[in-house]
Amino acid sequence: MKPQVPPDALRAARSLAGLSQSDAASGSGLTRAWISKMEAGKERVLQANLTLRSFYEDMGIEFLGTLDVGSGDLSGIGARWRPPPGWPEPQSRNTGYHAERNGVAFLAARALAGLDQLTVARDVNLHKTVLARLETGSFEPDAGDRLRQYYEETGIEFLGWGDVSENLHYGVGVRWKPQR
């Protein structure tokens, strides 16, 4: 039996897919109110959680993490686009696996952490419009480096690997750094 997906991983999956709560509700057959409650950790109904999990998995997103059966502790919780089993062939656009132009999922990191844009912009000393551009894939080296460092210091790990020749990244996602 599949375990329930924690709220932070549900938020990260939705942001990776670029969906609003209404879009996720429409696609999964759940209500927007249920999506909101599950992402906030206010509802832990197994069937609804499994329905939402299947919806994201059918899109190509995989959920990450380990459960210590003895203690019940979760570690490395997150979500990413399912990567190909090996390095894609040169015709990588036709692999059937989701690829991103930008290998850093800043919006998913913010969703995983449960933070709002204004808080992050203030903490990193970025203008909110710069943060919004970074979250939609804009490449701004200095600001991007500062934002990545902020999330990594928060305990978030960025995932994925790229094909430099085609500027495509696979397995893009985020997770909480696993506890060792």
Image: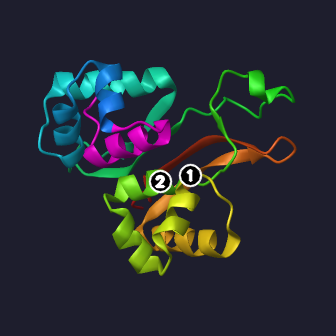
Residue found at the far bottom of this picture = 125
Mark 2 secondary-structure assignment: helix
Q: Does 111 sit left or right of 141 as displayed?
A: left
What label sits on residue 116 in the rendered view?
Answer: none
Residue 129: % across, % down? 51, 66
Callout 2 amino acid: Leu
Q: Residues within 10 Å of mark 2 (few under 14, many from 20)?
A: many
Image position of 35 with respect to 73: above or below: above
Q: Is residue 156 left or right of residue 97?
A: left
Quarter of the image where the N terminus is located: top left
Indicate whether residue 81 is drawn in magenta: no
Percent across and percent down for residue 15 are 43, 43
On the image, numbered disc 1 is attached to which residue? Answer: 136
Along the polypeptide, which appears first: circle 2 or circle 1? 2
Q: Label 2, on which residue?
A: 107
x and y percentages locating residue 123 in the rendered image: 40, 79
Identify the residue shown where x is 28% and y is 27%.
25
Left or right: residue 173 versus residue 101 is: left
Reply yes or no: does residue 4 show up in magenta: yes
Number of numbered markers: 2
**Extent of the magenta region:** 1-20
- The picture quadrant where one finds residue 156 is bottom left
Name the foreground residue: 100 vs 65. Answer: 100
Asked whether 73 or 129 is in front, the reply is 129
Task: For marks 2 and 1, give the CA distance.
Answer: 8 Å
Three-letter amino acid code of the residue under disc 1: Thr
- Which is more foreground, mark 2 or mark 1? 1
User: Residue at position x 33%, y 62% from top?
Assistant: 116
Q: Is residue 174 above or below residue 29?
A: below
